[in-house]
Image: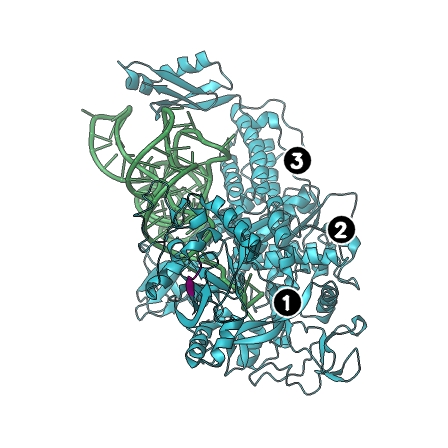
Amino acid sequence: MTRYNVQETEAKWQSHWDESEIFQVTEDPARPKYYVLEMFPYPSGRIHMGHVRNYTLGDVVARYKRARGFNVLHPMGWDAFGMPAENAAMAAKIHPAEWTWENIRNMRSQLRSMGLSYDWSRELATCSPDYYRHEQKMFLDFLEAGLAYRKESWVNWDPVDQTVLANEQVIDGCGWRSGAPVEKRKLSQWFLKITEYSDDLLDALEGLDRWPDRVRLMQERWIGRSEGAFMRFPISGEPEPLDVFSTRPDTIFGASFMALSPNHPLAARLAEDNSDIAAFIAECNRLGTSEEAIETAEKRGIDTGLKAQHPFRLGIELPIYIANFVLMEYGTGAIFGCPAHDQRDLDFARKYELPVIPVVAPRDADPESFSVGDEAFLEDGVLVNSDFLDGLGVEEAKTAAIDRFVSEDRGRRAIVYRLRDWGVSRQRYWGCPIPVVHCPSCGPVPVAASDLPVVLPEDVDLSQPGNPLDRHPTWKHVDCPQCGVPATRETDTFDTFFESSWYFARFCAPNADEAFTREAAEYWLPVDQYIGGIEHAVLHLLYSRFFVRALSRCGYLDLAEPFAGLLTQGMVCHETYRSADGKWLEPSDVKRIEGGAVVTLEGERPVDIGRSEKMSKSKKNVVDPDHIIAAYGADTARLFMLSDSPPERDLEWTEAGVEGAWRYLNRLYRLVADPPIPLTPVGAGRPADMTGPGEAFERLVHKTIDGVSGDLERFHFNRAVARIRELTNALAELPVEGPDSPWLTRFGLETIAQLIGPMTPHLADEMWQTLGHEPFLVDMPWPEADMKLVTDETVTVGVQVNGKLRGTIELPRDASRETVEGEAFAVPGVERAIAGKEIRKVVVVPNRIVNVVV
RNA sequence: GCCCGCUUGGCGGAACUGGUAGACGCAAGGGACUUAAAAUCCCUUGGCCCUCGGGCCGUCCGGGUUCGAGUCCCGGAGCGGGCACCA
């Protein structure tokens, strides 16, 4: 039997593609363009199955669009700055740069073995000065445009490692490496004014109609526009009043306390001469900076002893607390608490025995007796206990309350956003240096554009805690660009989201002296189809959307949105295995035996099978793409990635599924290498007379072309694969003796090769050549379905009685109602079901269903 | 805590906008070929009942809308993801 030599064949086509440079593209105004981009990887060392899935999806789209006549840009690069390089440097004593470049070398060769249609001449790595110098220039332009500024903000500080920790590095309030309790610290940092675009970023979401709804919704919530009012409360015995923001000014008469964020300036002032308050604030600061930590913590507070005066109720004073659930970043960092109509306020009030005064009652409730228990009343209703607001609905009451605040000059209507400005400073080494010099007399001064790039020094010492740039002997010492006195460089580097916010533009002109050329960017952008993980639904995508706005303002380009279409792929999962002593086992350490049980490969000891989870090193349920490609080839891995699950959903990697894909590829190869019957010569005409089965098969080919095309357009890759397999099954069943079979078999095989080309490109080119064609299949136009053959002349219609299927009938398409009813009543199952009953109604849905109601 | 998503046979999934539930694949069982095995090919396969014609039940659970619900609405359960310094 002819055997498919996958390693040899895949290597052969990869080098052919490479030598002929077929995937290198240039701008061509005569042709429609299509820009396919997959989120570029962090060079962690080896590709994982998530990458394989992501890049397979992109490659299918790229190859399909190319066959459809588009000039396709499909580039790849490396998101090469980031913390893991520093961690590796500390753990293995390798320089981050060396570690990163070595990883890039490895991963590039792994990606190449997948046979992806990248234009490798455009490859970039963000850690190269050639790349990051442009973002230093962008930062200078942002500064000049007023889009970058400096302010203090809070960070998680590890006192032992002398470093700032990411939220994920804070475990139970302690540093992940040092184990020391984490402190909140205030640092002066650089921010980008993303909030200036809050409304625009929100409004433009509507136009992103090729984005998943849930991603748009997540961004909408993230931006978090809310309407309300700023209100001023005088504090008894204090000169300065307290400003608060509330979305519920209507509940002002239900206020029973005020609460300050532990980071509020007033709280800080009170702490100066009150050790209890200072201790409470210090404790809050141990909580970490994440919203999750703050929201899940028990609601706690401390009474400051200060009293705020109720704006509309003379003589009523409200105690001012400092509370751990009030965020300094939102509104003014202070609130009035209305326990009856806010759950957090209610929890707090119950704990500190503060009054709970209902001021909104359900419309059908008795206002006198309505009270609130352990659940705040959040719905619409009628205002009660509220003086001039009594009897109004919630919306009317909001307006009336704000109007009164305004007329008494105690507040104003306002819109606030949850979105905060983007802090881009990182106290780390392996990132893009922020091009600023701190001068003792001029303050922070931008580096002159002509002095860019500020190159990250490589001779650093990572063996001690803290930022190595800070203690570098020479690098940071420079003269002030403005006044010339000795000054020091900014030692912070950019957040790595900075690099990924514009790489899609750099790919348009990767060798340009400037960040990118306007010409190339205007030809290629926006990205027509962006593909990546849902984990980037908010930050990366929102920052990139902000970046094109900021770059447009600074004259780099003229673009509304970076990504016109977005596909978010699910995770790659695998069963988990544990030995009897509870240790995780790798899939390659176990085997499946008769009956489905799993045992260890060595010693055949029993293994506990856990449920399928995202592949991760900690659970050891990782399958190395290299091993799969070595054993089965890239096409098998690609086909399995596409055939088992729709792209947005999680995919469960199974050895059996891989085997199935592998068997199918071999079957296809055998069909062309060793056809069941001799084929007609290349280009032979369609036989004039077709047999019945032949004609049915010919129709199926056209239906498959039509179906697969539609599936690929909508990213229903798993259905496309299923259809191609159906066609393959039908081809195998063609009668050997049929006079039209030699032609039909060729027609079927050529079509299968073309349709499966985007998914398994090596095999498809091999099939194409074996069938007698010149390479490359990727340059062939996509097959066209003959729509006359796609629609059958007859239809199968289901016949129901009272909604229950009783049989089916074969009818000419668009048969008359009379014909349909006549045939339907003649179905034996229908006759049985309606015998002796009165027919009340017959529903006929043309070409679909008949429902007899008795 | 807040926000978002998912739930269909033994398993992954299919079913376009409410119209024949289970396409396609995997696994399992049976058979063919073979000295044997692998590979390949063929058949069966949602559950229960059956007089082998068929009957009843069935898309996480409980309600509802409809001639008709996996699909729409209300309520609930379970699982997963995100929460601003991981990328």
Report, in whole angstroms, how far the alpha carbon at label 2 lies from the one at label 1.
28 Å
Q: Could you say which is closer to the camera, residue B9 or residue A22? A: B9
Q: What's the distance in space between the residues labelled 1 and 3, CA to CA?
A: 68 Å
Circle 3 packing at 10 Å, graded few (<14), some (14-19), many (20+), is: few
Residue at label 1? Answer: A191
Q: Are marks 2 and 3 in contact (CB under 8 Å)?
A: no
Q: Position of residue A165 (x, y in %)?
A: 52, 74
The residue beneath circle 3 is A681
Q: Secondary structure at mark 1?
A: strand
Q: Is residue A317 magenta?
A: yes
**For the residues bearing labels 2 and 1, Cβ distance under 8 angstroms:** no
Query: Magenta-highlighted stretch: main secondary structure?
Result: loop
Residue A817 or residue A132, whichever sits in front: A132
Q: Which mark is residue A53?
A: none
Residue type at mark 1 is Phe
Q: Neighbour class for label 1 at 10 Å: few (<14), some, many (≥20)?
A: many
Tell me, yes or no, whether dots 2 and 1 are on the same chain. yes
Q: Is residue A538 magenta?
A: no
Q: Which residues are magenta?
A: A314-318
Examine the rendering and report whether any part of residue A822 can be seen. Answer: yes
